[in-house]
Image: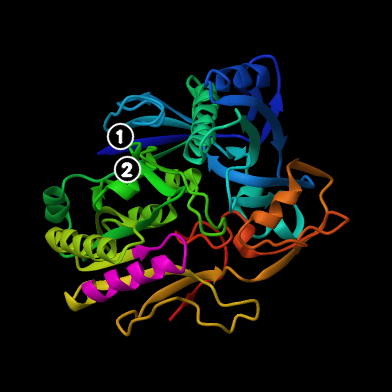
């Protein structure tokens, strides 16, 4: 498969009468976008705002972040299986509005998602303080069941990203990145002396709005699935989670999965990258045994020498992470684990809910319990009081002057377990 991602660099977003790109600025007709999103009968109201890097703007509670892009050659329009018919993704040419992002905001149920600060202390902890963000605040109609409420907000965000992406259809990209890997037979013939490496990407799949989606299929309902890495880079995997914001893998991060990009950078040089295995993180013991055993079987069938395993979430999924590690190591397949830690405010608590002597190479992406103080914003997009129901927040997190004290748990992407950020990592 060969995928070309053409980057159109976006340095600003402004509102205007026509949605288009003008010399690095994305101009958006906000009313046209609102009208489009309100075509969904589940959507009662939509508000659109802009948040730029460096502005004293706080966005809360964030549902998802999506990169606007458009397929200009090849199969698969938008988010295949969700906003369009199911087609094979991973090939062709895509124009990307690089530097722009759609950020969806809106209450869902129970624990919410996170906060993005575009400036100051908070900006240090989220990669989305560096993107020019079109914030879409969605209010569904009254009486929706929680899963329908979540779906309405999720799909509205995807449609907004598609709408913006169309602005780049006829724009010449400033940079084109090419990702190409052939069949396993072809790649083994090209690089017979390089170690074969697979990437196992664990996805939260716990129900109760704790789910990822692959070609529109809820990951609760799949066995571990082998994907060509280009498929994930081409919109095949999206986030549907309502969990701790710090290590939630947003749709934007799936579209730009940093583990996949790093493995691609070494493909044909130090390793032979054999593909991505998406593994659901289930809550039942039977489900864990089934998915972990099946994941190891796929790795053995691929004949890999090593595996990178990334987690999504913490606590319950820690057991899956270690179960896969133990099984692979016993098959003489070397593993490297990527996870964050839940080590308490002082950093001295046990970092993972489970452990194993086989886990000898573990990369930490930070402590989710680390407490930060976020100063008052000049402007809040959304509802600052939502911090009380965010994982990592509590009643009293929001002070009278608008200051927020919270754990990194509440900050979108702060401890990304695919390494999509700049937290210091440790190798054990």
| Residue at image point 45% right, 50% down | 208
From the top left corner, tell me how far across and down residue 336 is, in percent: 34, 71
Residue tagged by mark 1?
89
* Residue 376 in which image quadrant: bottom right
| Quadrant that contains the N terminus | top left
Q: Which mark is residue 230?
A: 2
Asked whether, in this view, residue 409 is left or right of residue 300, the answer is: right
**Stretch in magenta:** 309-327
Closer to the camera in the image, 128 or 39:
39
**Picture layout, residue 18 above or below residue 261:** above
| Quadrant that contains the C terminus | bottom left
Residue lying furthest front in this view?
Answer: 143
From the top left corner, tell me how far across and down residue 116 is, in percent: 67, 50
* Secondary structure type for disc 2: helix
| Residue at image point 65% right, 25% down | 45
Asked whether, in this view, residue 247 is left or right of residue 317, the answer is: right
Closer to the camera in the image, 329 or 230:
329
| Residue at image point 31% right, 59% down | 200
**Picture layout, residue 18 above or below residue 301:** above
| Residue at image point 83% right, 54% down | 402
**Picture layout, residue 417 above or below residue 369:** above
From the top left corner, tell me how far across and down residue 144 is, in percent: 54, 33
> Pointers 2 and 1 in contact (CB under 8 A)?
yes
N-terminal label among 2 and 1: 1
Asked whether, in this view, residue 224 is left or right of residue 425, the answer is: left
Within the magenta stretch, is there residue 294?
Answer: no
* Secondary structure type for disc 1: loop
């Amino acid at each position: 498969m060969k995928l070309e991602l053409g980057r159109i660099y976006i340095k600003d977003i402004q509102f205007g009468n026509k949605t288009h790109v003008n010399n690095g600025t994305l101009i958006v007709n906000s009313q046209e976008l609102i009208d489009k999103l309100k075509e969904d009968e589940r959507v009662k109201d939509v508000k659109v705002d802009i948040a730029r890097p460096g502005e004293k703007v706080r966005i809360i509670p964030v549902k998802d972040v999506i990169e606007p892009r458009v397929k200009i050659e090849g199969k698969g329009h938008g988010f295949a299986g969700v906003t369009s018919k199911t087609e094979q993704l991973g090939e062709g040419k895509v124009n990307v509005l690089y530097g722009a992002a759609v950020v969806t905001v809106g209450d869902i149920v129970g624990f919410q998602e996170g906060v993005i600060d575009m400036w100051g202390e908070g900006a240090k902890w989220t990669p989305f303080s560096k993107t020019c963000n079109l914030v879409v605040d969605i209010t569904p109609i009254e009486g929706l069941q929680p899963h329908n409420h979540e779906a309405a907000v999720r799909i509205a965000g995807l449609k907004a990203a598609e709408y913006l992406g169309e602005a780049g259809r006829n724009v010449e990209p400033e940079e084109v990145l090419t990702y190409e890997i052939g069949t396993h037979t072809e790649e083994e013939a090209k690089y017979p002396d390089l170690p074969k490496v697979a990437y196992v990407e664990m996805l939260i799949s716990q129900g109760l709005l704790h789910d990822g989606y692959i070609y529109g299929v809820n990951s609760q309902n799949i066995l571990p699935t082998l994907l060509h890495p280009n498929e994930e880079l081409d919109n095949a995997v999206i986030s549907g989670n309502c969990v701790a914001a710090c290590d939630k893998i947003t749709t934007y991060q799936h579209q730009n999965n940093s583990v996949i990009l790093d493995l691609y950078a070494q493909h044909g040089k130090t390793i032979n990258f054999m593909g991505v295995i998406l593994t659901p993180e289930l809550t039942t013991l039977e489900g864990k045994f089934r998915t972990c055993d099946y994941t190891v079987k796929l790795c053995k069938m691929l004949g890999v020498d090593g595996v990178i395993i990334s987690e999504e979430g913490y606590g319950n999924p820690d057991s899956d992470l270690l179960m896969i590690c133990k099984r692979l190591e016993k098959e003489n397949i070397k593993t490297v684990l990527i996870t964050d830690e839940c080590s308490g405010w002082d950093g001295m608590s046990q970092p993972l809910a489970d452990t194993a002597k086989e886990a000898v190479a573990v990369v930490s992406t930070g402590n989710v319990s680390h407490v930060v103080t976020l100063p008052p914003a000049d402007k809040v997009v959304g509802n600052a009081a939502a911090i009380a129901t965010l994982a990592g927040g509590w009643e009293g997190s929001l002070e009278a002057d608008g200051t927020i004290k919270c754990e990194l748990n509440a900050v979108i992407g702060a401890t990304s377990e695919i390494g999509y950020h700049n937290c210091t990592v440790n190798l054990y």
